[in-house]
Image (cartoon, rainbow, N blue to C red):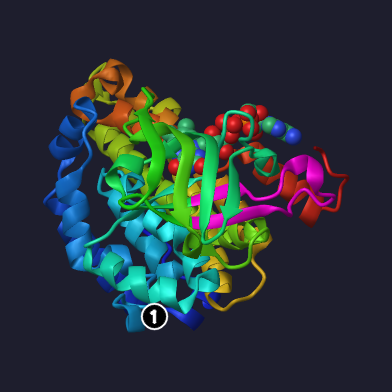
């Protein structure tokens, strides 16, 4: 294990180091039952890691963001991040189930009491899954306000037509958080208006909801979804009609901190694998790690992962204190995903040809961690946020 920098002054305000350590140890212990071979086989078969998600749900760790009154443990982003980090640090892939944490804020902050009472206790118990978050469309990736999927109110129902792309785990979820236009783009002055969020209970929809799996570089259970006169109750609407873009933005800081945490877990995994291999692999009569050309890139990647880790804790602590944390959350996501990718690249180089052999798991994690620089938000958009909102330069798009 690499040495960790565990907390900043700010972190101490929200969570004790002992609490975090105990969460880490419990999640590590759970992950021990799901070794490299489990994730490798799951990846090879493009299967869903059902047993892992079941174990995580039963442990209560997937429901930590659900308040106690609804059956969860009422913990915060700091703890949630550490859970996802430990899953990735163990060699696993929290992408299999992270959406439940990513989307929770929208439901908690903007959902009605009736929606919360109806769904949260069942999600906490593992009877229901909220694992799908449907935003991206063929004509609207980074430019979310361009979404074209329409939801039109007809009495006490909404009729939904349109298409989503890259929607993960729709087949492994009961509920889907859906972003749709209730007023067309051309009819609104402020393009962030006229967008609404729905909590769609996919077990009960009428009309046509078609889910078609996409064949991707990563085992992420990602789909194209078609809505053809999909008929949902008006009670699926979260908050006020037309205000959904604001609700989703509110959740972005949490999402960025959670993604950063996953990346930190990956970064540590790569650094540990690389340094361990560099100590053991003997070429030209000595361990390859004795060469500065091998050793220094690993040390540098470690330094970058550790620095990103501090930024993540800083952002999480601010988020948990309800302080402004847009800059910190974006910095954490950028730095952590880049540090993890650097560590992945260095690790692959350290392993030489063996890095490409599936049995070593490097290539699998290499693919998985690369995703974090692109989804759920591309790092270019993070830079645009920093350039515009923090450094006050002109809007670049
Ligand atoms: C495996 C996987 C799982 C996913 N899961 C989900 C999911 O569950 N739900 C969901 O809604 N979406 C999901 N996505 C979609 C993901 O969020 C988008 O792919 C991502 O936000 C980027 O959008 P895009 O692919 O349309 O890229 P585009 O918006 O087309 O951008 C393409 C490139 O151009 C760059 N770019 C665009 N505009 C600018 C600009 N103004 N300045 C600088 N650079 C710019 C982008 O940064 C990017 O590098 C998933 C994607 C993948 C690959």
Is 147 on the left-hand or right-hand side of 129?
A: right
Mark 1 crowdedness (10 Å alpha carbons): few <14, some 14-19, many ≥20: few
Residue at (54, 38) in percent of width and height: 161
> Does residue 374 show up?
no
**Residue 235: percent from the left, percent from the top?**
48, 65
Location of mark 1 (residue):
16
Quadrant containing ligand 1: top right
In the image, taking residue 70 as reference, residue 391 lies left or right, namely right
Q: SS class of the residue under badge 1? A: loop
Indicate whether residue 197 is drawn in magenta. yes
> Residue drawn 40% across and 28% down?
294
Q: Would residue 30 be seen by someone viewing this image from the given angle?
A: yes
Q: Quarter of the image containing the C terminus?
A: top right
Q: Which residues are magenta?
A: 178-198
Outermost residue to the right: 394
Q: Residue at x 22, y 62 (%)?
A: 127
Check residue 87 for magenta coloring.
Answer: no
Q: Position of residue 128 (x, y in %)?
A: 27, 60
- In the image, 105 versus 237, the foreground residue is 237
Return the x and y of residue 52 as percentages of the image width and height: 18, 50
Front residue (pair 301, 240): 240
């Amino acid at each position: 294990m690499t040495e960790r920098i565990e907390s900043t002054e700010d972190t101490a305000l929200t969570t004790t180091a002992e609490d975090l350590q105990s969460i880490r140890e419990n999640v590590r212990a759970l992950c021990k039952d799901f070794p490299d071979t489990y994730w490798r086989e799951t990846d090879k078969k493009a299967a869903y890691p059902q047993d892992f998600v079941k174990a995580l749900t039963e442990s209560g760790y997937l429901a930590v963001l659900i308040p106690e009154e609804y059956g969860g443990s009422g913990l915060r982003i700091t703890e949630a991040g550490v859970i996802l980090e430990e899953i990735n640090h163990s060699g696993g892939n929290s992408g299999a189930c992270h959406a439940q944490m990513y989307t929770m804020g929208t439901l908690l902050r903007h959902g009605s009491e009736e929606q919360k009472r109806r769904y949260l206790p069942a999600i906490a118990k593992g009877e229901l899954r909220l694992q799908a978050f449907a935003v991206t469309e063929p004509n609207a990736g980074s430019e979310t306000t361009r979404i074209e999927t329409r939801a039109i109110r007809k009495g006490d129902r909404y009729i939904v037509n349109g298409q989503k792309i890259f929607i993960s785990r729709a087949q492994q979820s009961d509920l889907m958080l859906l972003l749709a236009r209730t007023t067309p783009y051309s009819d609104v002055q402020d393009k962030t208006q006229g967008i609404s969020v729905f909590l769609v209970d996919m077990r009960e929809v009428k009309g046509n909801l078609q889910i078609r799996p996409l064949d991707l570089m990563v085992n992420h259970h990602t789909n194209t979804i078609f809505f053809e006169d999909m008929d949902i109750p008006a009670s699926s609407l979260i908050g006020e009609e037309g205000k959904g873009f604001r609700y989703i933005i509110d959740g972005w800081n949490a999402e960025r901190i959670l993604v950063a945490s996953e990346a930190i877990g990956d970064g540590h995994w790569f650094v540990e694998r690389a340094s361990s291999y560099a100590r053991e692999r003997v070429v030209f009569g000595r361990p390859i790690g004795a060469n500065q050309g091998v050793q220094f890139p690993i040390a540098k990647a470690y330094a970058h992962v550790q620095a990103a880790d501090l930024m993540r804790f800083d952002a999480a602590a601010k988020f948990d204190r309800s302080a402004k944390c847009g800059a910190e959350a974006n910095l954490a996501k950028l730095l952590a995903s880049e540090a993890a990718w650097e560590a992945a690249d260095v690790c692959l180089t350290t392993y030489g040809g063996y890095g490409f052999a599936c049995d070593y798991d490097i290539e699998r994690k290499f693919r998985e961690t690369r995703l974090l620089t692109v989804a759920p938000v591309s790092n270019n958009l993070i830079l645009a946020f920093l350039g515009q909102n923090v450094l006050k330069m002109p809007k670049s798009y």
